[in-house]
Amino acid sequence: MRLKRGKQLQDQHEALQAAASDPEVCLMYDPGTRNYGIYIVNQAIWKEFYSHGTNNEFFRSYTARIDYCPWSGRVLPGNLKHARSKVLKEEYGIYLPYWGNPKLVDLPDGFYGSEEWWVTRQIDRRRRPKVHRPHVPEGYYMVRYHFLLKDPKGTGKYRSREKPAHLCRNLSDAMEDIRVMICYIPWTREYGIRRLAVDRLKDEHPVRMVKIDFCPWCGEKLPDSLKQEWQRQIAIAGHSPNDEDLPGKFLTDTWWKEAGL
């Protein structure tokens, strides 16, 4: 069987490659399992995180798996955890369940943190994403604040309770939990993946993100950004984006809904 093109990270969209390689962007790529995900952060921006550095396991272990490239909308190659477990058992007699921690097992070269094992064996197993596209009704969307986050606004992880413009069922599950580092800015109608500076304490984190163009969970094109129009409307009203007395409607989705945009 010949390995199809487009499975390795180097074959993916340039923006996806850049995000996966940037330690500040909360997007994970595990080459050993071909898994992509958005980090689920509990303590990563607490002071304790910085005493351990960027390799803190509590930060790096939890992700919300995504199925579509956030910049191209194409389906991602698919997770190979089950395939890796099968190869290890059949070829080496090593039992590593797909949910197991590979760091606790003495794995052969190329089976952890590397694409080598599945590329050389030309493994191309993929699962079709379970996409839940039904319309999310009014009143269903509800932001949940995790009990470990006692100061969600102070950490820069405050999430608007306004219902996002695009909200498939899968995205809704991620958006409702503020630990998932997906971001939606209602006044500019922009989606993104959070950036966390690893050398800053929690109260120094503004909301920064890498803008995305497609839903990572269903692949649909996200609504166009209204940032330029937002800035134009603010200027017409005699304000600038950083004004402390900026009218409240410009800090919600009210202004563009009233304008029918």
Image (cartoon, rainbow, N blue to C red):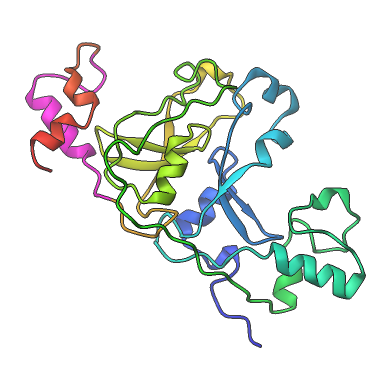
Tell me what residue is drawn at x 16 percent, y 17 percent: 247
Which of the two residues, 8 or 138, is positioned nearer the viewer here? 138
Quadrant of the frame with the C terminus: top left
Indicate left or right for 257 with 111 as reference.
left
Indicate left or right for 228 with 143 as reference.
left
Tell me what residue is drawn at x 14 percent, y 31 percent: 255
Indicate left or right for 96 with 28 as reference.
right
Residue occupying the far top of the picture: 245
Relative to 169, does residue 160 appear above or below in the rendering?
above
**Residue bounds of the magenta highlight:** 223-243
Residue occupying the far bottom of the picture: 1
Was residue 23 drawn as part of the magenta stretch in this picture? no
Relative to 60, does residue 148 appear above or below in the rendering?
above
Count every numbered label the image shows and give the total.
Answer: 0
**Residue 87 visible in the snapshot:** yes
Tell me what residue is drawn at x 44 percent, y 18 percent: 153
Tell me what residue is drawn at x 62 percent, y 63 percent: 79
Was residue 224 drawn as part of the magenta stretch in this picture? yes
